[in-house]
Image: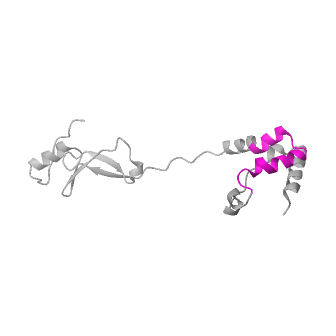
Amino acid sequence: PPSDEELAAALARLCAEGYADRLLLSLGVSSRLQLASCGGGGFGFLQRAFLPRARRHGLSAADEERITTSNAAALLCYWTPPPPPERTVRHWSCDACHRGYVEAVNEAEALPEDRVYFEKFSYRYCSTACLGAHRRAEFVQPFSAPPPPE
């Protein structure tokens, strides 16, 4: 592989030839051995060692800023995050007033407007008023109660 000195000279030459707007420099730290604590160049290698070598070979300050900052920002501007995935919900209805509700299957997707429910035996209720009405009717089925006030 080429030495750092050869790479710095090639980088300065490419910038001088007008390719600075197409170059992007970043760190290639991909293993533990490349960390400074393990004897490698570490995350500061580019600023501490490589760019001074490139400057000695004629890299201008404007080109340095372009290949380390501006080009990366321009590259990242093209990426747009994907839309959030559809929320996975379970539909349920109150066993007393029969109003329909949704609840998030995953607790991390729960919204404040998701209805809190109450369960008794195998029944689910949207409010304590519906639960109380069904209890007073001794849990008979079929059962219907007026919807509770919002």
Does the magenta stretch mainly form a helix, a strand or a loop?
Answer: helix
What segment is highlighted magenta in the picture?
41-68
x, y percent for residue 42: 71, 55
**Residue beneath the point at 30% across and 46% down:** 101
Above-or-below relation of 83 to 122: above
Q: Nearer the viewer, residue 13 or 34?
A: 34
x, y percent for residue 112: 36, 41
Q: Quadrant of the N terminus?
A: bottom right
**Residue beneath the point at 24% across and 45% down:** 126
**Residue beneath the point at 76% across and 44% down:** 68
Q: How is the image coloured?
A: one colour
Side of 85 where 136 appears, left or right: left
Q: Quadrant of the C terminus?
A: top left
Whether the magenta-drawn stretch holds residue 64 is answered as yes
Q: Nearer the viewer, residue 118 or 10?
A: 10
Whether the magenta-drawn stretch holds residue 89 is answered as no
Side of 105 where 15 appears, left or right: right
**Residue beneath the point at 70% across and 56% down:** 36
Residue 24 appears anywhere in the view: no
Q: Nearer the viewer, residue 58 or 71?
A: 58
